[in-house]
């Protein structure tokens, strides 16, 4: 999945991400989009999507949790981030490498029963597309765990 495909799906760059001194740092570049709730997002590093996720809460809160949890893991501190994921982050973002986080509001669908937000379904479809494109084998994609 490429930058062009992400923008085709309506995702826009919202933040930059890198690791410095065993700390994951996320720099917000789109203050409005990170306020969204019920949204989908993707981390693009080295021209490849490495994580697709969704957030019911404001995206900025989700991104700050990434910073906190992954930083704790990188420093060997207690963290909900699994050890194998910690290693992947270190490999994906070595010194001098950064990535971009893309996001957009999830789609609101109208049915005979009313309206609902399909952001979680969109997340699943994008993960399925990523697997079918062969960008990353299933054991290497970073997903919401």
Image: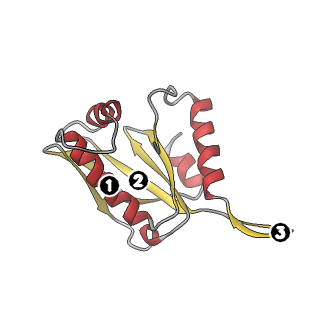
**Image quarter hosting the C terminus:** top left
Task: Compute the Cα span from label 2 to label 3.
Answer: 34 Å
Task: Compute the Cα span from label 1 to label 3.
Answer: 39 Å
x%, y% of residue 104?
Answer: 53, 62
- Mark carried by residue 92: none
Q: Is residue 135 above or below residue 17?
A: above
Q: Residues within 10 Å of mark 1 (few under 14, many from 20)?
A: some
Task: Compute the Cα span from label 2 to label 1.
Answer: 6 Å
Q: Camera-side residue: 136 or 83?
A: 83
User: Relative to residue 27, is residue 3 drawn left or right?
Assistant: right
Contact, CB < 8 Å: mark 2 with mark 1? yes
x%, y% of residue 9?
Answer: 60, 54
**Residue bearing mark 2:** 101
Q: Camera-side residue: 144 or 95?
A: 144
Kindly tell me whether residue 96 is visible in this rendering: no
- Which corner quadrant of the image does residue 39 belong to? bottom right
- Which corner quadrant of the image does residue 14 belong to? bottom left
N-term mark: 2 or 3: 2
Residue at horizontal 24%, vertical 41%? Answer: 73
At numbered mark 1, what does the secondary structure look like: helix, strand or loop? strand
Residue at horizontal 26%, vertical 35%? Answer: 90
At numbered mark 3, what does the secondary structure look like: helix, strand or loop? loop
**Residue bearing mark 1:** 16
């Amino acid at each position: 999945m490429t930058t062009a495909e992400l923008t085709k799906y309506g995702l826009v760059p919202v933040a930059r991400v890198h690791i410095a001194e065993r700390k994951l740092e996320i720099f917000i570049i789109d203050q409005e989009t990170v306020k969204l709730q019920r949204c989908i997002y993707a981390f693009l590093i080295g021209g490849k999507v490495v994580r697709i996720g969704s957030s019911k809460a404001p995206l900025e809160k989700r991104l700050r949790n990434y910073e906190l949890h992954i930083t704790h893991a990188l420093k060997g501190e207690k963290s909900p981030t699994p050890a194998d994921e910690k290693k992947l982050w270190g490999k994906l973002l070595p010194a001098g490498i950064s990535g971009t986080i893309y996001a957009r509001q999830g789609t609101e669908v109208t049915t005979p029963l009313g309206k609902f937000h399909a952001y979680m379904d969109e997340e699943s479809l994008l993960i399925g597309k990523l697997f079918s494109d062969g960008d990353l084998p299933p054991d290497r994609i970073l997903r919401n765990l």
